Amino acid sequence: MENFLRSILDNDFFVYLIIGIIPLFWIIPYALVVIYLERKVSAHMQDRLGPMRTGGWHGWAQTIADMIKLLQKEDIVPAAADKKLHKLAPFIVFIGSYAVYAVIPFSSQYIGSNINLGLLYVVAISSLAVVGILMAGWASNNKWSLLGAMRSVAQIVSYEIPTVLSILVVVMIAGSLNLQDINQMQSGWFWNWFIFKKFPFVFIAFIIYFIASLAETNRTPFDIPEAESELVAGYITEYSGMKFAMFMLSEFVNMFAVSAIAATIFFGGWNSPFGSFMNGPLWGVFWFLTKGMIFVFVQMWLRWTLPRLRVDQLMYVSWKVLTPWAFACIIGVGLWIVL
Amino acid sequence: MPETNLENITTSTGRPLRHEEVVVNVGPQHPATHGVLRLEVVLDGEIVVDVIPHIGYLHRCFEKHAESMNNYQQVVPYVDRMDYCAAMNMDFGYVLAVEKLLGITVPERVEYIRVIMAELQRIASHLIAAGTYGLDIGAWTPFLYMFRERERILDLFEMTCGARLLYNYMWVGGVSHDLPPGFIDKAKDFCSYFRPKVKEYNDLLSYNDIFIRRTANVGVLPADVAIAYGCSGPVLRGSGVDFDIRRDDPYSIYNRFEWQPQIGRGEMGTTGDCWDRYMVRIREMEQSINIVEQALNQIPDGDVFSAIPKRIRPNPGEVYVRTESARGELGFYIVSDGSGSPYRVKGRSPCFSNLSVIPEISRGCMVADLIAIAGSLDIVLGEVDR
């Protein structure tokens, strides 16, 4: 793709600009669809109908209407807030989530930046959101926001460790941090996917990764940073209008990002499950998005089923359950490879 | 709950470390407080150091209003608005008190209708309590499931008296409307529909591992503390005290039915924890269904308006009647000076006493536990403030 763009454009700047913008063409419609989907999924799980009026057919235009409403809203900055930080925070959070897409291979022919340290980059850049969240909590000058931000930072930092350790299991098998390489190793039928290798270690690693990624995206049962029944809305309490929308957008962007990583490193990414059947660069996009959306759906499913953990229980799960098991997986896979 | 003894931590020179405490207001506008309760919470990080409940945001001078009504009957709509989640139970308590003051007995059919309504209302009220409790813990879905069933109870009420929340249904000496045709069949349908639903709630919420972890051993209210604070209803029974006014001091016709008061047994943790209080409500709903079914089968025919007095003018005197509302011991103390309007009406609010234990049982817990405790007490501020 990069070479193709280079052949029609003579300026490298435009080439990288186009490559950089392509994920946005996925994210914006994805956010519109997934917010609508979240409402419909939750509604049908709860014996409701969800939005039914806006736009006619089953309220399909509800998210668009909401977006327009949020754009029109007054941009309120609390008088006692640290105004610069308050304005900056949502964008840093969004950048943190969006930058992950740079190394996610959407297809065999499209990846934003095919760097050798892809997975390490994902782990590193997704932590950028922590800075934004802490900024939001601190700058709002609100006790609930600060409590929410503190919880969130503690949570994301803790859950990064099991995430990284479970990713490490895959890296040990693949011997590469490059996501395109990892995908190519899983080509062929679905039993070539890493999830079925070195059973059960990689499978356990996947479970650990998925639970930890729920916590990293602040989804139920780990949504304590924005636990509406305790902390009003956590660090987004003082945000309204488009800045609130940016937080929401980054949550949904993050949801897909962690799902995409799970699909890529455990479930073959853009590879067709059926060997060469329906395989190719464009089918690759289809398979990749399908796999990602399945995990997004599972996240919604869990959200509308489970209650929320308490802060200390959350830390307990991370440090005393997930981390030791992730270490056990690493040791198991390591022994398997050596022996 | 981890024991947090912060005073024992000192520097090497023996000076106790100072923790910075913050005061936060949970409420009166906060998503977790049921109604307009304001909890002034002193926090040390996530740990609750002290809780000071502030009430009075919904004070509507019910007792004073009652004195200036020119008829005892006109107080009933005000009574409705005390505990708006269980308005039938409120009506029931008040009309029983006035009837005792007047010394009248009501027809059999009226007694049965009242018991059916009161027990259906108890189910509806417990559904709100359990559903919003799930919401407090972070589970959205059970809340809407429970509202689905509550809707059917409200349909039954609407069918009977036209109102869905505040009924003004029970009148002194009778009820405002006889049961409409088809009510008994529809109510029986509801009973058979509702029984399996309780299992659904248990599968989805009561025995959910996360829910148990969040509520078991949290906010333990020992039986002696509960009695000392005058707690009643599911809060008292959750602490393992087997006391239900419907059985121990029967009013109306409650002694005719087969049912069992439910008490907390500490299955998931300590007796008197949040899970016990929650579970008592779930089990009480099944018992209420038993009572409703029996009453529906036994209900006689008759004229429901025959005992309604033309003029309510009781002899001078005073009366106290206590009934078991959905939230506990609801008492009405009425003083008559012989005129047409009550000289004094005092409501004994169960929620007020139940609320008063919050500081006692939530010191040293975490913020999330405080919300769980407040939710498990099931407070309706309309009744606390009156």
Image: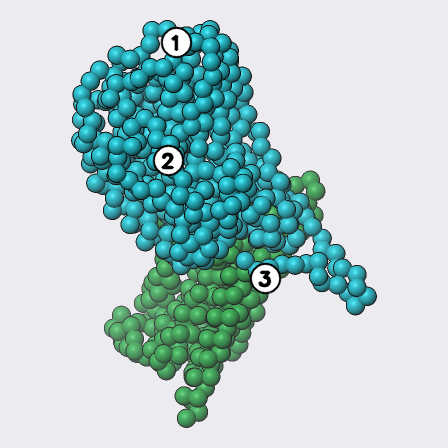
Chain colours: A green, B cyan
Residue B170 x %, y %: 34, 20
Three-letter amino acid code of the residue under disc 3: Ala
* Residue named by callout 2: B248
Residue B339 x %, y %: 46, 6
| Disc number for residue A154 | 3
Three-letter amino acid code of the residue under disc 2: Asp
Read off the chain for label 1.
B
Residue A109 x %, y %: 40, 71
* Residue named by callout 1: B312
Q: Quadrant of residue A210?
A: bottom left
Q: Is residue A313 visible to the viewer in this orientation of the structure? A: yes
Q: Are marks 2 and 1 on the same chain?
A: yes
Asked whether the residues under the numbered discs 3 and 1 touch, taking CB atoms below 8 Å apart as contact, a structural biologist would say: no
- Mark 3: which secondary structure? helix
Residue B135 x %, y %: 44, 46
Read off the chain for label 2.
B
Q: Residues within 10 Å of mark 3 (few under 14, many from 20)?
A: some
